[in-house]
Image (cartoon, grey):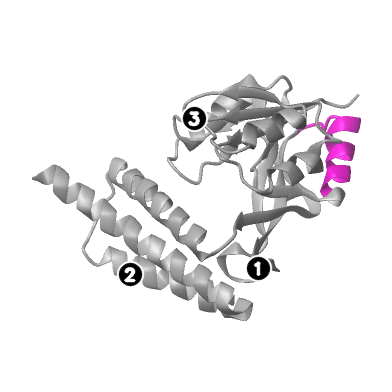
Amino acid sequence: MGARLSVVYVTKNAGRHFGRSLASVANIADELLVVDSGSQDNTLMVARNAGARIIERSWPGFAAQRQFAVAAAENPWILMMDADEILTDTAAKAIRNAILIREPAGVAGYRLERRSFFHGKEICHGDWAHDQVLRLFDRRCGAYGENLVHEAWETHGTIARIPGCALYHYSYANYGELLDKLRRYATLNAQQVHQRGKALHAYMPMTHALAAFWRGYFWRLGFLDGVEGAAIAWTTALGAFMKYAMALELRDHNQQ
């Protein structure tokens, strides 16, 4: 006998792809759960039209909000989705076979391959290329870590993989959105570095930025993605620079 599956979203102003995302999981979801933190656009209307259960809750941070959503779900198996991700038909069938038809013995979670798009173009190289994300899991076997940003599900069980491309990711419509998110994430990353008490040196912003650009643009062949690949590499490098520059700023401010 298979398990039941809750598809869970954490949202705020979910954006233009949310309706498509909900539609892509409709056939495998025993429950659609949306935990929203003050959307001002049509996010809640789109969720209601899809038949989702909605919980409105103030924002406590990425990991804490996701952990709350997992705990609030009705079913033990969770598919954690972002509102700008579309589940492929192939992945939906694989999840149905893996989870809904027969509950997997000894498996605590599955990694999903995610392909990102920018300016309507698939990004095939660099730091965004075909990453693997742990999004399908048995909530009885783990929890979200305490990172302020780039939170991830942590489990003590066996991890398997859903074959093929599982998620199409449409995270940014333009360069302005890319820069806006860079600023928010750099701030959170800097706070995280500061809170961990990591030793900091004046050269670190530049060395981390140069390393990030080299990795994404040259080592991972980001230049093959053209202008978009260059933009991703440069903004990743700038994010690394600002992460450590702002962490140094926090340290110096606290020492005064």
Residue pointed to by mark 1: 123
Question: Cα distance, mark 2 to mark 1?
Answer: 26 Å
Dot 2: within a 10 Å radius of its alpha carbon, few (fewer than 14), some, or many (20 or more) residues?
A: some
Disc 3 on helix, strand or loop? helix
Q: Which amino acid does label 2 sit on?
A: Thr
Residue 172 lies in quadrant: bottom right
Of marks 2 and 3, the one in the foreground: 3
Q: Residue 64 carries which label?
A: 3
Residue plotted at (62% across, 76% down)? 225
Q: In which quarter of the image is the N terminus?
A: top right
Please name the predominant secondary structure of the magenta segment in the image: helix
Mark 2 or mark 3: whose residue is earlier in sequence: 3
Q: State which region is magenta.
A: 91-106
User: What separation in Å lies between label 2 and label 3 (alpha carbons)?
Assistant: 32 Å
Q: Is residue 148 above or below residue 66?
A: below
Three-letter amino acid code of the residue under disc 3: Ala
Tell me if 171 is positioned left or right of 180 in this view. right
